[in-house]
Image (tube, rainbow, N blue to C red):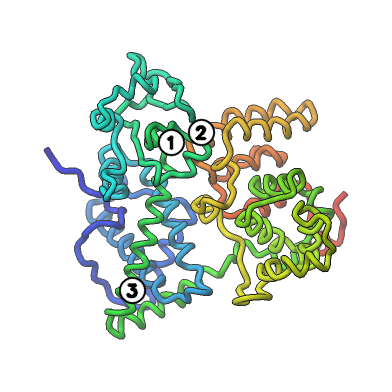
Amino acid sequence: MMRTRFPIWYPFQEIESIKFKTKKEEIESLLRGRLLVYNDGDFNYDQRPDESHKEYHDRMTEERKSYTLLKMGMTNEDKEKGYLSSWFIEKEGDLFEKRFSDSNWEIKEKILRHLFPNDDFGQNWYPLDQLSNILDEKLETILGIGNEDHMLRKISNQRGGRRIDVRKGLHKVICINFRYADYMVRSRKSTLYKGWIIDNVDRLTSTIKKRYEDALFEDLENYKEKINSEAPGPIRRLTEYISNVLTNMIPRNAEFDFSNFQFEGSYDENLLLFPPCVQDLMGQMKTAGYLKHHNRFQLGLFLKHTGMGVDDQMNYWFNFAVDNLDISYDQFEKNVGYTIRHLYGMEGGKTDYDMMSCGTIQSTANYHCRFQDLKIEKIKEIIQEYIFSLPADQQMEKANIFKNKLEPLIKLGKPSEACAKNLSLTIPKDYVWERISHPLQYLKLSIDNSETKTKSEENINGVKND
């Protein structure tokens, strides 16, 4: 029996040494090629019908080269001001998610064994039948998925979480140790049984992606240490050059430049333009008057990057936070003013904080993402309330978008894709956008595709939009 190998695109494997001349033109061409893969969604790694074996081999060699060069460029960035590493991990994570989803079961199984290795607690993932043998329990029966027609329909279970989709076969139902998917436990995204998250492998792709990104981060940190401590001078100079090239190719948050951005009207009047995570946090502030520390940080950065100044943000928290009752504004400013000014780089280490990306929000337990953290019932409640507020002639269209396009993405555990489809509920047309990778990206797309104008846009056009 032939042993399954890792796919060519998978970076965590021993491959033959790749040699190439370090000409500037070649380096820049390879880096641009990788960026095109990221930006254009050209995830294909199979040999194309019109491609000879040599052409395919050359294309895969270029892919390995471009990945290696990017990795080298990460080793030279400033730890305090650097952003390339987080960008690199997020982009590679997106690439992995697509390619893993498109792989056959044998390749998925090979990758799962690598990403969830044995540790002091034992093995951290199993196919359903193997866990059944280890626990000596008939999990198919206990979880209500051991029916004869399991290949044809979804079977519900009584253990909480969503129904397990077994239409693709029981061997595709996998079990991951809950330590690797704590947010799935909190939000009941999948079935939890005796410390194991159980679901179809395709529904757990976001969890597997998160583990891949963690492994990539660990590998990158080890690689940085090795380069900085062992690499000879020419290699170090090469990493510095690549880092400078990447910094010029990928300006910090250039695609989300909202400097001096102001709304026409209040934040409340423009609430539907905001990403769902921000809508939820602002809603909680109005109704409960309290957010946890990380949620305050998340909302505070959004307010900062959409034009709210330090004094206005100070007033915002003073007016809404319940823990500021019975104290004067001067007392409030003395107590928490430092924290708010810190967001703007005016205190402490003087760091001018960027708004975190969706990848950071989704991979950090204490930040908030509606489509990852809330139960499906609560999401339905929020969206149905919005749909019922629309004119009658729009309600059916928006309800169908939610039921047929948005809800399936939520159930598949694809929060970034679900967030993109959520745009179609709040703008005039059914928007076609694959995924959202940044809260400010959502806001920009929302504004660009709605009738709302910003003050800066009106000034440019010279005409106020009624």
Q: Identify the residue at image location x=49%, y=52%.
A: 363
The kind of secondary structure element at disc 2 is: helix
Quick one: label 1 or label 2, which is nearer the N terminus? 1
The kind of secondary structure element at disc 3 is: helix
Residue receiving disc 3? 225
The amino acid marked with disc number 2 is Lys
Q: Which mark is residue 203?
A: 1
Direction from residue 448 to residue 64 in the image, left or right: left
Direction from residue 324 to residue 85 in the image, left or right: left
Q: From what the image shows, is residue 395 above or below residue 27?
A: above
The residue furthest bottom is 233
Q: State yes or no: discs 1 and 2 in contact (Cβ < 8 Å).
A: yes
Quick one: label 3 or label 1, which is nearer the N terminus? 1
Gap between marks 1 and 2 measured at Cα: 7 Å
Q: From what the image shows, is residue 70 above or below residue 120?
A: below
Direction from residue 263 to residue 193 in the image, left or right: left
The amino acid marked with disc number 3 is Glu
Viewer-closest of 48 and 42: 42
Residue receiving disc 2? 411
Q: From what the image shows, is residue 444 above or below residue 330?
A: above
Q: Identify the residue at image location x=70%, y=25%.
A: 396
Gap between marks 2 and 3 measured at Cα: 40 Å
Q: Which mark is residue 310?
A: none
Q: Position of residue 94 (x, y in %)?
A: 45, 51
Viewer-closest of 47 and 364: 364
Q: Position of residue 90 (x, y in %)?
A: 47, 57
Q: Residues within 10 Å of mark 2 (few under 14, many from 20)?
A: some
* Residue 28 in view of the camera: yes
The quadrant where residue 340 appears: bottom right
Quick one: label 2 or label 3, which is nearer the N terminus? 3
Q: Position of residue 27 (x, y in %)?
A: 37, 72
